[in-house]
Amino acid sequence: MLSWIDNHCHIPPGEDGDAWVEAARAAGVAQMVTVGVTHERSVEAIAVAARHDGVYATVGVHPHDATDGTDGLAELLSAPKVVAVGEAGLDYHYDHSPRDVQKSVFAEHIALANAHDLPLVIHTRDAWEDTFEILDAEGTPRRTVFHCFTGGPDEARHGLDRGIVVSVSGIVTFKNAQDLRDAVNICPLDMLMVETDSPYLAPVPHRGKKNQPANVVHVGEAVAELHGISAEEVARATSFRAMEFYGLGSFG
């Protein structure tokens, strides 16, 4: 069985999360990164990671909740199995928080990642120009990923020029996502990771259902088809990149 890493998911606490992890293991998903989107959810992610071998946590505030600020995040970074800052960034599609607040809070996350030499997990939607402008102004952390990448080849190239890894979600399997597939095509395999963003964005053939980390296998298979290589090669390359990116090898 191939070994995969779901580098971005949101595993619920308790028995539901336990079932997700068990199903992922059965599907060949060896490791998972469960992602914080608020202070409370970051604490929850830390607890989920502590509950399971091979599950790690991130700490951050989603742009939807940017008005909550970053108070208390720095203290969480020292918790066991915290491997990154984020997800953080800009979302101009929904604008749930004022754009000036989103920009300020995004910059604070970048500063945290740089100060602690931790990876930065970015959510950006309909905000590419400002995203790159802020990264350039603040200094792109040496390990940065565009999670659930939704841009096209131009956005991918701008990211790759800055050393930013592209993380591919189940959107790559959607019929209306040709720009994304074109972007994945031009990304070197060693600059790609795969994710589910569970419980959202279930890939074909599970579209419309609640997503789970086990489904990252379908994302990897879609990437393999686009690159004209085997799923085994994609599993090996994306897992190596995720382990190196998040420093998972240091956890044993």
Image (spheres, rainbow, N blue to C red):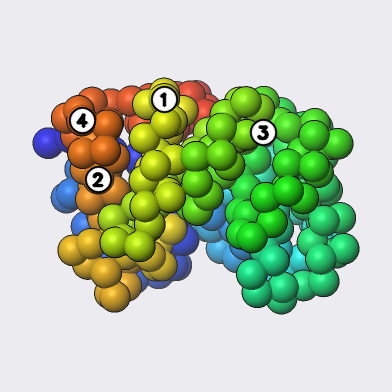
Element under label 1? Answer: loop
Taking the image as shown, residue 144 lies to the left or right of residue 45, namely right
Mark 1 or mark 3: which is in front? 1
Is there a contact, CB below 8 Å, between mark 1 and mark 2? no
Give the image location of residue 131, x and y in percent: 73, 48
Circle 1 residue: 188
Q: Is residue 209 above or below residue 132?
A: below
How dense is the environment of label 4, judged by Cα within 10 Å: few (below 14), some, or many (20 and up)? few
Q: Is residue 97 above or below residue 241?
A: below
Mark 2 or mark 4: which is in front? 4
Element under label 3? Answer: loop
Query: Which of the 4 image quarters holds residue 142?
Result: top right
Circle 3 residue: 118
Residue type marked 1: Pro
Circle 4 residue: 228
How dense is the environment of label 3, judged by Cα within 10 Å: few (below 14), some, or many (20 and up)? many
Q: CA distance from mark 3 to mark 2?
A: 29 Å
Q: CA distance from mark 1 to mark 2?
A: 15 Å
Taking the image as shown, residue 124 lies to the left or right of residue 166, namely right
Residue at the spot 31% in from the left edge and 61% down from the top edge: 174
